[in-house]
Amino acid sequence: MSSTEFALALESHPLASLEPVEVAFVLGSGLSVFADAVDAEYDAPFGELPEFPGVGEVAGHRGRLVVGTIAGRRVAVFAGRVHRYQGLSARDAAWTARLAASLGAHTLVVTNAAGGVGSRLATGGLVLITDHLNLQGDSPLAGWPGPAGGTPFVPLGDAYDPRLRAAAHEAADSLGIALGEGVYAAVLGPNYETPAEVRALGLAGADMVGMSTVPEVIAARALGMRVLGISLVTNVAGDAHLSHDEVLAAGRAATDDLMRLLPAILERL
Ligand code: HPA
């Protein structure tokens, strides 16, 4: 497989005729209202996009891509994503990041809904991802020979760009929005965690747990993009009565903060 295949070929797709974007956003469960902030020149459901790997859509994850401008900046906004738990490989689960690279993005901002591991992070809070644990048993780079002249042994020591994190804190401070920091553990799902798994995640250094994001981040780094990650803590991980509807509702409740924060971050990128 060549590097162009990894980045996704647009060929004669209508997306190929658009001017390159600067920044791409991936919006997680219940967080997709930011897509409506785009002054759109292209807006299509995922099913119409190149090499969309989606199967068995889960409510709230049905996706669309909006390309256009926000405050004059060229952006691509993925409202939704694809997940490993749909039975996809990590490479397919990184489809948003691979398409973002094809659209010209130099920066990828990923958001997700996550469970809080332990009691340090308040439910309903926004948390900057400082690092991750890949517990999905797969990498989007497995089987990829690497970029032309390169290797797939991509360093992840600074996967979540320190300068972008500083910009995000500055944006949050300017708006009076509390923005924590934490380590995100990606599990396969789609079941939520047992109490024993949550204890193990805590011992391993995780602050949040979710079922997405990490394949996209690894792919983005392999494709030379800078990455910023933000989790919304929708619940306490391991809660016996947790439901997907509850996660979506918590996402919607934090939408106001995220809608203010993302444009303020974009201004500073
Ligand atoms: N666990 C895994 N993924 C999640 C959770 C959780 O508790 N909440 C939202 N996504």
Image (cartoon, rainbow, N blue to C red):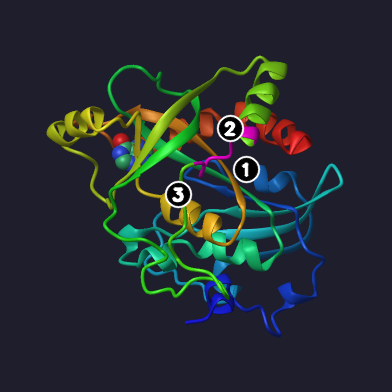
Q: Quadrant of ligand 1?
A: top left
**Label 3 secondary element:** loop
Percent position of residue 99, x then y: 60, 66
Camera-nearest residue between 104 and 236 = 104
Q: Which residue is mark 2?
A: 255
Camera-nearest residue between 237 and 131 = 131
**Do the numbered discs 1 and 2 sit on residues whose CB atoms are within 8 Å?**
yes
Q: Which residue is mark 3?
A: 213
210 is higher (above) or lower (below) than 177: below
Residue at 58 percent of width and 74 percent of height: 8
**Label 1 secondary element:** helix
User: Magenta region's main secondary structure?
Assistant: loop
Residue at 45 percent of width and 66 percent of height: 152
Q: Earlier in the sequence, mark 2 or mark 3?
A: 3
75 is higher (above) or lower (below) than 37: below
Percent position of residue 244, x then y: 34, 42
Instruction: Give the side of residue 139 with respect to residue 109, left or right.
Output: left
Identified by mark 1, the residue type is Val
Neighbours of disc 1 within 10 Å: few (<14), some (14-19), many (20+): some
**Residues rendered magenta in the picture:** 158-163
Q: Which residue is mark 1?
A: 33
Identified by mark 3, the residue type is Thr
